[in-house]
Image: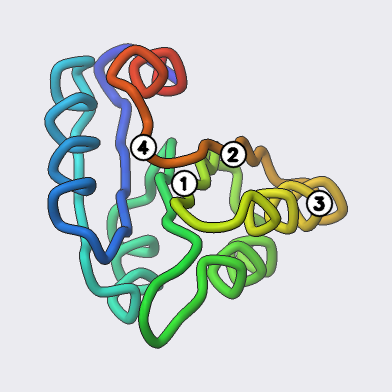
């Protein structure tokens, strides 16, 4: 991944969290696309071709684990940073699925500190 070509796709139904991730990533020279509607994720993924994805696990309509499964079906090579403010079990499920399906998944418990987010994006 070259320094000038980092692309981050964020999907989180909490606009404040998505904005926090977006501002932090832009400060690290990412081009960022942030979505609050998980129904738009698949189209945005295909159009944007991200290097890194920040994915909420619990959202209306579509669960994050469904999107992780879908990413596996797409042979996704992006790093996937799973964020959840709910039971840490959601993150463990995503990690396990990622391991089995060959995805690069990391999990983070919300709230995520600025330092932790910067480290994860670096």
Q: Is residue 99 left or right of residue 71?
A: right
Q: CA distance from mark 1 to mark 3?
A: 15 Å
Q: Where 52 falls versus 56 (above or below)?
A: above
Q: Quadrant of residue 94?
A: bottom right
User: Which mark identifies residue 107?
Assistant: 2
Residue 47, position as x, y percentages in the image = 29, 62
Helix, strand or loop at label 1? It is strand
User: SS for tag 2?
Assistant: strand
- Which residue does the image show at 52% across and 66% down from the upper left? 64
Q: CA distance from mark 2 to mark 3?
A: 11 Å
Residue identified by numbered label 4: 111
Q: Are marks 4 and 3 in contact (CB under 8 Å)?
A: no
Mark 4 vs mark 3: give the one in front: 4
Kindly state the secondary structure of the residue where label 4 is placed.
loop
First of labels 4, 3 by sequence position: 3
The number of discs equals 4
Disc number placed over residue 115 in the picture, else none:
none
Q: Are marks 1 and 2 in contact (CB under 8 Å)?
A: yes
Q: CA distance from mark 1 to mark 4?
A: 9 Å
Mark 1 or 2 closer to N-term? 1
Q: Which mark is residue 83?
A: 1
Vertical placement of residue 1 versus 87, above or below: above
According to the image, label 3 marks what residue?
96
């Amino acid at each position: 991944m070259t320094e000038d070509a980092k692309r981050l796709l964020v999907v989180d139904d909490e606009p404040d969290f998505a904005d926090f991730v977006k501002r932090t990533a832009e400060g690290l020279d990412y081009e960022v696309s942030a979505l609050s509607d998980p129904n738009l994720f698949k189209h945005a993924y295909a159009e944007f071709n991200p290097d890194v994805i920040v994915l909420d696990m619990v959202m209306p309509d579509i669960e994050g684990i469904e999107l992780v499964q879908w990413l596996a079906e797409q042979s996704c090579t992006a790093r996937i940073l799973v964020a959840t403010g709910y039971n840490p079990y959601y993150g463990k499920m995503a990690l396990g699925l990622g391991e089995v399906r060959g995805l690069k998944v990391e999990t983070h418990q919300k709230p995520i500190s600025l330092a932790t987010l910067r480290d994860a994006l670096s």
